[in-house]
Image (cartoon, rainbow, N blue to C red):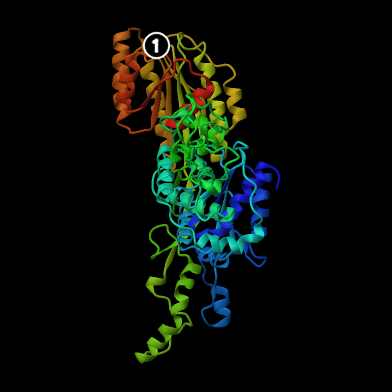
Amino acid sequence: MTGPADRAAGWVARLAALDPRGLGGVVLRGAPGPLRDALFDALRTLLPPAAPWLRCPLQVDDRSLLGGADLALSLAAGRTVVQPGLVERAQGGVLVLPMAERAGAALAGRLAQALDEGGFLLVALDEGRGPDEALPACLAERLGLCLVTCAPEAAWPEPPPGDRLPEVRECWRQMVFDDPTVQALDACAVALGIGGLRAPWQAWCAACAVAAWQGHAQVTQEDAELAARLVLAPRARALPPSGDSADAAPGEAQEPADSGRECPSTPPEADPAGTRDAHPPDTAAEPDERPAQPLDERLIAAAQAAMPAHLLALLASGAGPRRGASGGRQGQATRAATAGRPLPSRRGPPRGAQRLDLIATLRAALPWQGARAQERMRQSLPPAASRWQIRRDDLHVRRHQRPAQTTTIFVVDASGSQALHRLAEAKGAVELLLADCYVRRDQVALVAFRGAGAEVLLPPTRSLVRARRALTDLPGGGGTPLAAGIEAGWRLAAGLQSRDGARAQLVFLTDGRANIDRQGQGGRAQAMADARQMARQFGGSGMPSLLIDTSVRPQPESAELARLMRARYLALPQGRPQALHRAVTAML
C-alpha cells in the first residue's frame, strides 16, 4: 500500500476484522471511488475465502432480512419450511448496505438490533450530499469506524501485514484496561460535542485493536490518536472550546509542533505515554521549552487534523451537523391505505379502505396448521372442510407509505424600496431550492406584493425550466401592501394543504414597513395595523414560516411581525441567493 487512501482503508479493514462486535462496522461517506475499492479489497484479503459477502437492498422485507417461513416451499412440502434471512446468512462475513442515507426507520432499527447481537460486519455506503441526507442515527452510533472520501490526506502509518490476524487476535485478547487513556478519549469526545458513552467506548476498542496490530502490550499515545482519528473525528459536532487546535483555519490538516511527541531518537516502547523529557535530567530546560501536553489535548488535535474541510467549515459557522437525522431524499412521509410504497403488513382485520394481505395471512397461519388439526381431533370435531384453518389472529392488512409533497412559497416584497435587488435574490434562491427539491419531488411558488395588492407570479411547480421562464421579467415598484402579501401567501398555502398529503411552508422577504392598507389606500399607520392583524390571524394557522428582514438596518417592526406570525425571524441585510437558500434549508 502506498497512498494515504490505501493506508487508511487498510487500517479500517484490519480493525473491523479484528473486533467486529465492539466496532460494529464501517461507514464509508462519499461517492464511489478508489477509497471504496481499497476498503473492499482489504476486507476480502483479511476475511476467510468462504466468508459470506452479501448486499442488503433498501426495499428488503422482514422475512428476507430476518428469515422466516417460506410459503411456497411449505405448501409444496406440506410442512413448515424456514428460510434464513440476510442477517443469518451474513454471519461471519460482511453485509453491505448501499445508499444507506436512504434507509428507512424500520430497516435501520432492525439492522441496529442485529448489530447488537453481533456476528457480522456491516458496511454502510453513505452517499448523501446534504444535511437532510444522513445515515439514520441508530445505525450511525453503532458503526464505530468511519472513512470520508474528502478527508485530508494526513499521514497514516503503514498497516501491518494482514496474514498476522491469528496472532494479533491472541494479543488483542490479552490487552489490559487503561483508565487514563479511556478518560482522555472521553474528554476528547466531550470537547468535540459527541454525546453518549458509545463513541468513547468504540474509540477505546479501536485503540486496543491498533495496539494489537502494532504488537504493543498496552495502548500507547499513537494508538489512541489513530483511534480518535477514525472514530471520533468524523462524528464531531462542535469545535474544541479552547486551545490552538480550535483556532485553525477550516480545511487545514494540523500537526502541531508542541503535540507532546518525543523526538525520533526516543523509542516509543521506552516511553509509551510520551511524557518523558527529551533532555537528560541534569540538563537545564531552555527558556522557550513548553511543558508536555496532556493526552486528551493531543487526541483532540489529532482528531481535528483528520476532520474533512467541509465539516470544519460547518462547525466553524456554528451550524453543525443535524442530530438524529432520519436521512433519505423522499421528503416527509405520510400514510395512505391504498397507495404509495408498500410497507410491512400489520396484524389485524381489514377496516374501512384497508385491504387484506393474503400472503402475509397465510404465512402467519402456516406454522399452526398441524397444532390446529390435532386440536380438532382432541375435541372430536369433524375435519375442517378446507385444508387451511385461518383464524382472526392470522389476518394481516396491507400498509402503504406515500411521501408528502412539500411546497415552499416565497412571499417577496416587490415594492419600490425592495424591487431593485430583492427580486433578483428571490429568483436565485428559487432556482437553488428547485435544484434540491427535484429529487424529493417538492415544489416552489412565488408571490409578490406591490402597489395595491399581491399576485402569484409563479404557481407551485418543480420544473426548473418553467421557473426560469416565469422569473425572467418580474414586475417591481410601487407601495408596500404587506397585509395583502401575507393574505395571498396564506391563501395559497391553505389551498395546497387542503389536498391529501400536501404541506406548505412560507418564506417572507420584506423590510416590514407597510404603507398600503388592505383597501389599497395609502397611510402607514393603517397599513401597519392591517399587517399586524393579518399576522395574528396567520399565526393562528400554525403554518411553518420564516420571515427574513431585508432592510439595511433591521428594525423592530419586522421582529414584531414575526412574533405575531409565530414565524422564525432572520435578519439578512446583505442577502444573496446562496445565503437565502442556506437560511431556508437550515431553518425550515
Most foreground residue, 471 or 152: 152
Q: Give the residue furthest to the front.
A: 282
User: What percent of the width, then of the height, locates residue 140?
Assistant: 48, 48
User: What percent of the width, then of the height, locates residue 65?
Assistant: 53, 63
Residue 348 figure quarter = bottom left
Q: Does residue 299 sit above or below 342 in this rendering? A: above
Q: Residues within 10 Å of mark 1 (few under 14, many from 20)?
A: few
User: What percent of the width, then of the height, locates residue 127?
Assistant: 59, 44
Which quadrant would the C terminus be assigned to in this image? top left
Q: Residue flagged by tag 1: what amino acid is it? A: Arg
At x 50%, y 60%, the residue is 21
Most foreground residue, 465 or 343: 343
Most foreground residue, 241 or 107: 241
Q: Give the residue furthest to the right.
A: 2
At x 62%, y 39%, the residue is 155
Residue 380 seen anywhere in this rendered image of the structure:
yes
At x 42%, y 76%, the residue is 390
Residue 57 seen anywhere in this rendered image of the structure:
no
The residue that label 1 is drawn on is 553
Q: Is residue 530 left or right of residue 179?
A: left
Most foreground residue, 467 or 418: 418
User: What percent of the width, then of the height, locates residue 374?
Assistant: 41, 88
Q: Does residue 74 sit above or below 469 in this rendering? A: below
Q: Does dot 1 land on a helix, a strand or a loop? A: loop
Q: Is residue 306 left or right of residue 556?
A: right
Q: Is residue 381 left or right of residue 75?
A: left
Q: Does residue 410 sit above or below 388 in this rendering? A: above
The mark tally for this picture is 1
At x 46%, y 77%, the residue is 367
